[in-house]
Image: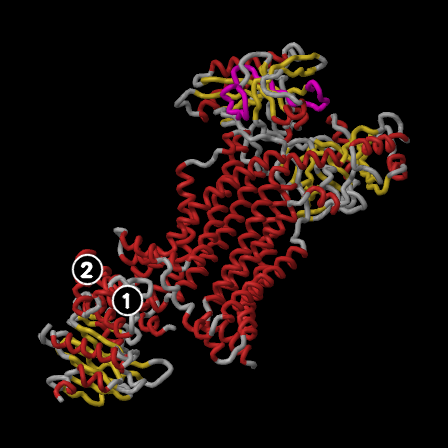
Amino acid sequence: MTGTGPVIQMDGVNRHFADGPAALRDVSLTVEAGEAVAILGPSGSGKSTLLNMVAGLDRPDSGTVTVAGVRVDRLDETGAARYRRTRIGMVFQFFNLLDDLTVLDNVVLPAEMTGVARGEARRRANGLLDTLGITKHARVYPGRLSGGERQRVAVARALMNRPPLLLADEPTGALDSASGEEVRALLRELHADGQTIVVVTHDESLAESCATRTVRIVDGRIASDVRHNVPSAVAR
Amino acid sequence: MSALGTVMRAGVRRRRVQTAVTGLAAMMAVTASVLGGSLLVASNAPFDHAFAQQNGAQLVVQFDSAKASADRVGATAHVAGVTATAGPFPTASVNPSGVVGMELPAGLSVPPMELVGRADAGGPVDDVSLTAGHWASGPGQLVVSADWTGPQLSVGQKVEVPAASGGTAELDVVGIARSVSATGDGWVAPDEIPALAAATSREGGSTGLQMLYRFTAASTAAQLAADRAAVAAGLPSGAVSGSRDWLDVKNSNTSSTGIFIPFLTAFGLLGVLMSVLIVGNVVAGAVGSGTRRIGVLKALGFTPGQVVRAYVGQALIPAVVGTLLGAGLGNLAAGQVLGATEQVYGTTSLTVAPSVDVAVMAGTLLMVSVTACLTALRAGRLRTVDALTVGRTPQPGRGRRAARIARALPLPRPVTMGLAQPFSRPARSMAMVIAILFGAVSVTFAYGLGTSLQRIQDAKKSNADVTVLSVAPPLPGSTGAGAAKPGSVDTTAMTAAIEAQSGTRAWFGAAQSQVTAGGTTVAVNATAFFGDASWSGRQLVSGSWFTRPGEAVVSTPFLTATGTKVGETVVLNDHGKAIPVRISGEVFVASSGAAMSVLTDARTLAAAEPDLRPQVFSIALTSGTDPIRYTDALNAALRPTGAVAQVGDGGGASQMVILLDALTGVLTLMLVVVAGLGVLNSVVLDTRERVRDLGVVKALGMTPRQTLAMVIASVSVVGVVGGVVGVPIGVVLQRIVVPAMGQSAGLRLPGEVLDVYHALPLTLLALGGLVIAVLSALLPAGWAARTRTAVALRTE
C-alpha cells in the first residue's frame, strides 16, 4: 500500500480519566499512508490512550479522530467493531491469541467475522502464514509456540482483512531479544511493502529499526515529531 | 484490620456480581427449601397432626334433647374410659333459603346447615381453629365451617334462615373456622339455638344436643363401638340419635386429601434437592474462579489455612445475608402456600415449623462452608506457580474436537464459537445442564400434573351439552325444604318435552340409589341410567360400558371391597332384593363421596325399585344447535313440570383443582427461578473468566450483537441438553406420582388421565430448557456485549 493521503488525522484530542491527570492534551497528529510511525514515551505518558483512540477502543472528550476516512470518535460500539474489522489490524504486547483455537483458526477469525467465504479466508490465511514463515504451525494451538512465533501469528491475524493501518502496542515488549529481532524484521518488511504502521513502544531500538517517523509523548502532549526517510537504524 | 479480613472484605466488594449471585442463590435456595421442607412436614400425616393439635373429638354423639336432658347428657362425661369431654352443646339443623346478594346457578339451592351453639371455639376437646373473623358472641352471629359443602362464604356476608316468627331472619357471618373433627357446618352463640330450633321444628328440621368425647382407648373401630355403647348405656333408649367416630372422619379426609400428598411431597423434595445443587454449584464456582487470586495470596505468604479461611469467609458473608433474607421470604411465601395446603388437606394452623427454619438455615450455611472449604483447599494446595496460571482460561486441549465440529457448521462464526464453549469447561457445563434439567423436570412434571388433575376434574363431568334437573329450584321466598323432592316431578312429561325439542340428538336420565354388594355391608352408590348413557364420557380403566340390563360398570374401590374382577358376577342387594349383575367394566369415579359406585341400566334395578325415576337428564345436541337457545326453548316446554334445563353439565371448576393449579404454578415458578439462578451464576463466571478473550474478539471486530449471539449460543447447547434429558425425567416423575396419587385415594387412573404428553407439548417442554438457559444468560451476555474492549483487554 502506498501513500495516497492521510490515514490518521487527529485534531485537538483531549482525554481525561476521572482519577488522574489528563491522559491526552490537545493532541493533533497526521499520519500519511505508507508511513511507519513509532509513538514513544515513558509509562503513563498517554501513548496507549492515543493508540486506543485510533483503534476505536476509546473516545476523546473533545477533538476529532479520523482514520482512513472514518470519524472514529463518532462511532457507536457496533460501528467501532465494524471499523476495527475492516480498517485496522492490531498487534498486542501479550499476543492476545485465543488459546482454544488453532493458529489457522486464530488467523482466519477476523475474515470470518467480516463474512468472507470460508475457502477464501483459508486461502488468504495460508498465504499470510506462508509469508510470515509459520505455515508448519497452522494446526498447532498457540500454547505450543515461542513468543516470536505467537507474535507472528498475531501479525498474520491483524493483516487478515488487509487493513490500511496496522497498530502495534509494544509488539516486542514480551519477547526475548532473538524473538524481538524477528518481529522488528517483520515490521520492516511490511513497511517496505507499503503497509502503514503505528507502533506504540518505549523501546527505542524498535523505533529506530522500524519507524520512518518518531513521535514522542510526554504528559499527554506531543513533545517531538521527527521524520526520517528510512528507519534511522537502517540508515546507519 | 488483619490481612485476612482485608482480603476477605476486598474479595466481597470487588467481585460484586459474584457476591450478589451467591447471596441471591442462597436466598432462593433457602426460600425454596423452607417452602419445600414445610410442604414435606405438612404432608406427613396431615390429618393426624391437625387432629392432635385440635384435641380432636374421638367420638361425636348427637342426642335427642326430648329424650335426654342436658344434665343427663353432661353426666356421660363421667362414664368409665372417658378422658375428656366438651358439651353438651345445643344443636339445630336449619335450611338456609339463600345468601344475601348471592345469585345461585339455576337448579342449585343452599344445602342444610348443622349449627352448634358454642360459647367459644376452644375447649378440652375439638379446639376449633378460626381462619378468619371472630367467634360468634351475640345474637344473629354465625361462624361458618371452612368445610361446609354450601357456597363459599366470607366474613361480612349474611345467610337467610327461617325465623321463629315465620318469614326469614339473617345470620351475619362473623368468622370462618375449621374443626378437624367435623363437628358442625357452623357455630352460633348458645342463646341463638332456641330461636333457630323453634323455626327448624316448624319446618320439620331437627334439634338436639352434641357431646364430644376423648377416651383412654379409641384407636380401633371395636374400641370406639364399646365407648359408644358405654356412653349410651346410662341414657334412655333412643336418646342417642347419631354418632360419628374419628376413624370415619379420618377415612373421609384421607380419601379426599390423600390424593394430593404425593404431589406436594414431590414438589417439596424437588425444591430441597435443587437448592442443595444450586448453592453447591454457585459457591464452588465462585471460589474456584478465584484460583489465580489464591495463587497471588500464596505468593504473598498466605498459608493454605489462611487461604481457606479467607475464602470460606468470603462465601459466608453474602450467604449469611442471603440466608436471612431467604428465611424471611420463605416464611412469607410458605404462609400463602401453606394456607392453600390447609384447604387441600382440610387441616388448620399449618405454619412453618421452627425446626424447618433452623434446619434449612443451618444446612445452607454448612453447605456453603463445606463447599467453599473443599474448593479453597483444592486451590490452596496447588503449587503457587500453577495457581497463578490456571483459572483464567480453560485448560488447553479441552473441547477441541467440539470446536472443530462446531466450526464446520454452516453458521456465523460467533455462533459456532459459542456452541463449542461449553465443551472447554465440562464440569461447569455439567452443573449448568443439571440446573436446567431440574427446571425442565419441574415444568414438565407441573404440566403433566396440571393436565392430569384437569382430566380428573373433567372425568366428573359428562359430555352433556344441556342438563335438566328434575328437582325444581326453590322459589323466591320459599325455603329449601319446600322444594320438590328428587323424582317427585313428572319425568314422563319431561322425557316427552326433551324428545320433542328440536335439536335433541341423544339423551339419557340418571337416578341415584343405594344398594349393598355381596360380601360387604358397605353402602354402594348405584347410578341407574335411563336410555343409552355410553356417550356420557365416563372414563373406563378396563373392560367396556354395559350394553344390556343385568350388566354394570363399577368403581375400583368396589372391585377391591368385593374382591371381584371385570367379567365376574356380583350380587347387589337393593331394598331386600338380590340382583345378580355381571361386571362389564371398571369405571373411573373421581369424586371421593362416590368411591363405592355401581353404574347400570335402570332396568337392572327395576325389580327392586319399580318407581325409580331420573333426577337428572343429560342431553347431546345435534351439530349446529345453539345450546343457549335450545335451553331457553326447553325451559319453556318444561315449565309445567317444574324442571330446569341448563347449559353444560352444571359442574364448575373444583375449588381443589383451582388451589392445586395455583400451588403448582407457584412451586414451578420457584423451581424455574432457582434453576435460572444456577445458569445465571455459571454464565456470569464463564463470562468473567473469558473477559480477556471477549476483549480480543471485540478488538478484532466482533460487534456487541455478535458478542451477545456468542454468549447465548454458548448456553444454547446446555439448554437443549438439559431440556431434552429433563423432559423424559419429568414424564417419568408424572407417571410415578400421579398413579401414586390415585392409589392413595384407592383409585386406578384411566389412560386418559395419565397419557397427557403429546408431541407438540413435549417439543415445547424440551425447548423450555433452552428458554430457561437463554433468559438466564441474557444478563451476563448483555454485560459481555457492553464491556469496553480496552477494559476487557486489560483485565487479568
Q: Is residue B156 above or below residue A191?
A: above
Badge 1: few (under 14), some or many (20 or more) residues near its Cα, within 10 Å? many
Tell me, for residue A194, which label it has, or none: none
Looking at marks 1 and 2 on the same chain, the residue that comes earlier in the sequence is marked by 1
Residue B297 x, y percent position in the rendering: 48, 77
Q: Which residue is mark 2?
A: A121
Task: Tell me where residue A134 sits by quadrant.
Answer: bottom left
Q: Look at the image and tell me in which quarter the C terminus of chain A lies.
A: bottom left
Q: Is residue B440 above or below residue B317?
A: above
Disc 2 residue type? Ala
Q: Is residue B22 left or right of residue B135?
A: left
Disc 1 residue type? Glu
Residue B541 is a magenta residue: yes
Residue at x-position 75% and y-position 27%? B202
Badge 2: few (under 14), some or many (20 or more) residues near its Cα, within 10 Å? many
Along the line of sight, the residue nearer the viewer: A23 or B695: B695
Residue B488 x, y percent position in the rendering: 63, 17
Q: Is residue B553 left or right of residue A30?
A: right
Q: Is residue A63 above or below residue B698?
A: below
Q: Chain of mark 1?
A: A
Residue at x-position 43% and y-position 52%? B772
- Can residue A73 be seen here? The reply is no
Residue at x-position 59% and y-position 34%? B742
Q: Secondary structure at mark 2?
A: helix
Residue A59 x, y percent position in the rendering: 27, 75
Along the line of sight, the residue nearer the viewer: A74 or B771: B771
Looking at the rendered image, the disc whose residue lies closer to the viewer, 1 or 2, is 2
Give the residues drawn in magenta, as a range.
B516-544
Q: Which residue is mark 1?
A: A77
Residue B270 x, y percent position in the rendering: 55, 49
